[in-house]
Image: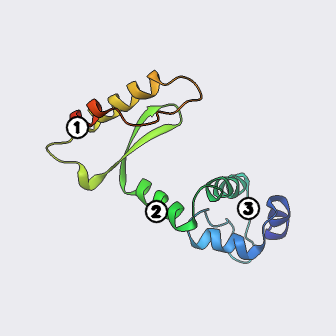
Amino acid sequence: MDIHAFTALVGETPRQIRFLITEGFMPPPTGGRARAQYGAEHVEAVRRYRWLRERFSPAQIKVMMTAAADALRLPVAPGIDLLVDLSLIGPGLDPARIAERVRNLLADLPQGETPATPDPEDAADAP
């Protein structure tokens, strides 16, 4: 779909769409500038940005997205990845051990609840 159909569908202005593309919050359209086309991945990117924007500032969202690009991604549960900063990986850090501990923590959580405070014993074991 073209920019007019896309903006009507997602309820955003062309200016906001350009902002999202420029800031890296959504991919650029296909087809070049004169024949720009938007698809389902663009609609999803706008929805994701709105959800994040309700919770974080644009600067915080950008940091999260940048961190994801510069990190080792370790899946710990369906839809949940542990991101480990590549600069931390060295002789004293075992990413697989950390991922396993996070998996165990998530498995022990009752549905719909989050831990109130970290367990002090876990902090002593942290690498």
Look at 22% across and 37% down and name the residue there. Answer: 94
Q: Label 2 belongs to which residue?
A: 63
Q: Label 3 belongs to which residue?
A: 38
Residue 10 lies in quadrant: bottom right
Residue 4 position within the rendered picture, expressed as x and y whole percent measured from the top left: 84, 69
Give, as a three-letter code, the residue at label 2: Val
Q: Badge 1 local density, few (<14 within 10 Å), some, or many (20+)?
A: few
Element assignment for label 2:
helix
Separation (CA) of disc 3 from disc 2:
25 Å
Give, as a three-letter code, the residue at label 1: Asp
Element assignment for label 3:
loop
Separation (CA) of disc 1 from disc 3:
42 Å
Look at 24% across and 51% down and name the residue there. Answer: 88
Q: Label 1 belongs to which residue?
A: 94
Residue 122 lies in quadrant: top left
Residue 29 position within the rendered picture, expressed as x and y whole percent measured from the top left: 67, 66
Residue 76 position within the rendered picture, expressed as x and y whole percent measured from the top left: 42, 32
Look at 71% across and 72% down and name the residue there. Answer: 16
User: Tell me, what colour scheme is on the image?
Assistant: rainbow
Left or right, 111 with reference to 74: right
Identify the image quadrant of the N terminus: bottom right
**From the viewer's perspective, is the residue at label 3 or at label 2 nearer?**
2
Q: Badge 2 local density, few (<14 within 10 Å), some, or many (20+)?
A: few
Residue 108 position within the rendered picture, expressed as x and y whole percent measured from the top left: 45, 22
- Work out whether mark 3 precedes mark 2 in sequence or the reverse, and give the earlier one: 3
Q: How many marks?
A: 3
Asked if labels 2 and 1 touch by Cβ distance under 8 angstroms, the answer is no
Q: Is the residue 98 above or below the residue 41 in the image?
A: above
